[in-house]
Amino acid sequence: MIGCDPRPFTLRELCLMSLGKAKEKWSHTSAIITTIVNVNRDPKKAALPFDTFNPFNERVAPGAIEVTDETLPEFRKMFKPK
């Protein structure tokens, strides 16, 4: 899957290498997809960034609240059974 002999590596190392290869492939693929979309888009609209179609790109939803020690009690109240 990653193109090398897996015997000298631990399972953790193999998983990290596999994840890295998948991220690299998706980076390449999403750049191609975005180029195709941008070439065929309406000229009046803004071009999309190259990581738009990358599933590994971390996106934060607008209005999202990060879970920290300060916000954890609020989350516990929201998900506490009634």
Image: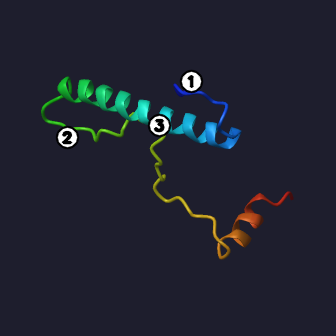
Left or right: where 74 falls relative to 44: right
Residue 7, above or below 75: above
- Please tell me whether mark 3 or mark 1 is closer to you in this view: 1
- Please tell me whether mark 3 or mark 2 is closer to you in this view: 3
The residues tagged by marks 1 and 2 sit, at their Cα atoms, a distance apart of 38 Å
Left or right: where 62 falls relative to 68: left
Q: Tell me which amino acid carries mark 1.
A: Met
Residue 13 location, quadrant: top right
Furthest residue toward left:
43
Which residue appears at 28% of the width and 41% of the height? 49
Residue 37, given in percent of the width and then of the height, sits at 26, 26
Q: Front-most of 27 and 11?
A: 11
- Total labels drawn: 3
Q: Front-most of 48 and 28?
A: 28
Q: Which mark is residue 1?
A: 1
Q: Tell me which amino acid carries mark 2.
A: Ala
Residue 36, above or below 49: above
Residue 64, given in percent of the width and then of the height, sits at 53, 58
Which residue appears at 77% of the width and 58% of the height? 79
Q: Tell me which amino acid carries mark 3.
A: Lys
Sequence-first tag of 3 and 1: 1
Residue 25 location, quadrant: top left
**Label 1 Cα crowd, 10 Å radius (few <14 / some 14-19 / many 20+):** few
Which residue appears at 85% of the width and 57% of the height? 81
Q: Determine which residue is flagged by label 2.
A: 46
**Label 3 Cα crowd, 10 Å radius (few <14 / some 14-19 / many 20+):** some
Sequence-first tag of 1 and 2: 1
Q: Determine which residue is flagged by label 3.
A: 23
The residues tagged by marks 3 and 2 sit, at their Cα atoms, a distance apart of 26 Å
Residue 49, above or below 39: below
